[in-house]
Image (tube, grey):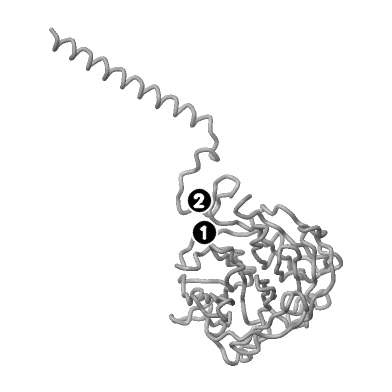
Amino acid sequence: MESNYFLKLFIICLVAIFLLSACEKTNNLSDNKNKTSEDIGPIKNESQINTWDKTKEKLDYLKPSGGNEELTFEVENSEAASIIGTDSKYIYGKSFTGYDPEYPDNNDGPGDNSIAIIGSGYQGTIAGKIYGSLATVNTSHSMTYHSDGYIYNGYAEDDHNLQRVNVKTGKVDTVYVPAGLLYRKTGTVEENPNKYGDSSFNILITSDGKYIYNLAYRRDDKPGNWGNGFSLRVFDPKQNWKMIRDLKFSDDSYYTDGLIADGKYIYIIEWDTGHRVRVYNPVTGELKAEWVSDQSRLSAICGQYDWINDKIWLGELVWSGHKPTGPANIYRYPGYKN
């Protein structure tokens, strides 16, 4: 009699557990029907990962394109602000190579190589207002501000001496890089980049505040011309420009004018053709994401990550294929905390 009682009790418990489980599944299904993809997230696959918007998913990388610029402003009385660096208060801008309103169709013109001091809108500055000229430097493809108080210009007369500007004094000099700098088209250290015809703007560089990154869109460890992969050198200015990494990655690459580093990833911006942006891990060379930018709309060519304000800034190239006259725009994109 007692055994029958416990058997009935066991069966009742099993039925109760089954009913509770079914009820919970029904409720979860109902909840998910009411949720958006932002709440539950899309199913990840390789084709989707590069089209997600940071506002819809907590991405662990940034996306400085796709119409998600949070601020756009014109640079006062300027048509040359395509190459920019920032110390979080000011944006320092200059002409990209020889593109200049005086030479709208001539890549070999002198360009406006004076560095303008432009308000960012932070720390009491007016966004787009020019607060003066810092210095005049050589023609280049890139320029970046570093936490040591220097702007490094992507110009090197030889393979070891990188041009820089002291932000406080405006003094222009060079710094010696013992391991050497990669020429952007060959992925090698070139003693005489003059032979390639554009020695004035041969170095692609950027800073994340801690390190300086130097990129080439060719690998010298495999056959082929530029387009066969990327080469990256990472330097630590605090350790007398010690090279802490020399990396070859990817089996293909593209013509690159924009390089950004945010301390976690590097962002490689293609100019023209495919308008691609790729995100790579600068330690492993692993591809994190790729998308097509809206460069055809904005003509955003290069810029820098602002590690103080957690923003990415990009400058607009004023040229006849986009808009022949300025003023040039500067675009701001959200960072990790947005």
Classify residue 248 as left or right of residue 19: right
Please name whichever residue, 254 or 8, is drawn nearer the observer in this view of the structure.
8
Locate residue 186: give its quadrant.
Answer: bottom right
Image x and y of residue 270, in percent:
61, 68
* 213 to the left or right of 126: left
Residue 218: image x %, image y %? 52, 78
Q: Which residue is drawn at the image coordinates 76% and 61% (left, top)?
A: 120
Viewer-side residue, 298 vs 152:
152
Residue occupied by mark 2: 48
- Mark 2 Cα shell of 10 Å, populated few (<14), some (14-19), many (≥20): few
What is the C-alpha distance between the residues marked 2 and 1?
A: 10 Å
Residue at screen point 50% across, 30% down: 33
What kind of residue is marked 1?
A: Ala
Residue 104 falls in which quadrant of the image?
bottom right
User: What is the number of the mark on residue 146?
Assistant: none
Q: Earlier in the sequence, mark 2 or mark 1?
A: 2
Could you say where residue 115 lies in the image, as x and y percent from the top left?
78, 75
Tag 1: Cα neighbours inside 10 Å, few (<14), some, or many (≥20)? many
Residue at point 40%, 25% (across, down): 24
* Numbered tag placed on residue 289 in the rendering: 1
Percent x, y for residue 338?
63, 49
Q: Residue furthest right?
A: 77
Classify mark 1: helix, strand or loop. strand
The relative height of residue 106 versus residue 131 in the rendered view (above or below) is below
